[in-house]
Image: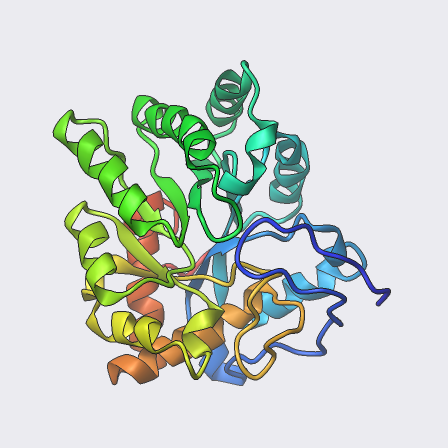
Amino acid sequence: MAAVTIPVACGDAIRSPEAPNEAPSPSGSAAAALALVDSHCHIVFRNFDDDLDAVAQRWREAGIRRLLHACVEPSEIPAIRALADRFPELRYSVGVHPLDTEHWQADTAQVLRAAAEADPRVLAIGELGLDLFREKNLDQQLAVLRPQLDLACELDLPVIIHCRDAAEAMLAELRERRERGACPRGVMHCWGGTPEEMDGFLELGLFISFSGTVTFPKAEATHACARQVPADRYLVETDCPFLAPVPRRGKRNEPAYVAAVAQRVADLRGESLETVAHQSTANAEALFGLGLGPAADTV
């Protein structure tokens, strides 16, 4: 595969990844028995163009029943919609990422509203949030965040929240909104905060989603969170093409690798992979209404 640069949208950018030959997932009957959800992915990026059918085959073999494709800015929406047409297991969100605030225009809220109302496969608003690691423009980020939170409440949709080095500001915003009945349900995606920060978001009713970072040996705070999070409040995701789990760290990530994330969460919790697969899928269904049904066994 030719070297490419992945647009920086979330997580840590990875450059010039090579497409792997296979996913780190259970094989044979073990994979067939799993029913996993990749609750956050970005397969619209161009480094999937050459082998997306093979990527899809691998996620199906790994037991991935649903993918939720996050949107980082409105121009992506037609391409993501086309992917949902191509892959019936894909659902998606619409929104503007905090590092893409330049894409927010006077009519953007209406564009997002129209896209959400036009397609029942739009199940969330986002990826929205705050990122004070890469940028310090808090006021500008809040100006883009707030109308999206309002839109989620208006449409009764959950939000997908990106929050990096910004837990204090995000908690303050959501707590103030809760006081006036304007705090939507949702998920803290690609969780990388402390247990204390996690408790604040759990108290607001939010879910916590673990990505490949939970497999990183030095991610001790994330490990503690995975052990402590209530069973009915966690999800698993890839955030692909970013943040491939160990042992493929630094390579291009893909949806099948969510099985490795689930396995690491299971190890940390002292539970079986099957237990974590079942629970995280049930949680994703409860939050997003993925249309899987109780058994989560059909596309």
Q: Residue at 54% of width from left, 14% of height from top?
A: 106
Identify the image quadrant of residue 142: top left
Residue 295 in view: no
Q: Residue furthest front?
A: 136
Report x, y in % for residue 280: 32, 63
Q: Is residue 127 left or right of residue 208?
A: right
User: In this figure, which colouring scheme has been used for the structure?
Assistant: rainbow
Q: Residue at 52% of width from left, 45% of height from top?
A: 135
Report x, y in % for residue 90: 54, 48
Residue 166 in view: yes
Q: Residue furthest right?
A: 2
Identify the image quadrant of residue 176: top left
Q: How many marks?
A: 0
Q: Is residue 217 left or right of residue 52?
A: left
Q: Is residue 298 left or right of residue 289?
A: right
**119 or 7: nearer the eye?**
7
Placement of 15 over or under 118, stated as above or below: below
Q: Residue at 24% of width from left, 58% of height from top?
A: 197
Report x, y in % for residue 217: 43, 84
Q: Residue at 45% of width from left, 61% of height from top?
A: 237
Placement of 129 over or under 51, stated as above or below: above
- Location of the N terminus by quadrant is bottom right
Report x, y in % for residue 171: 25, 44
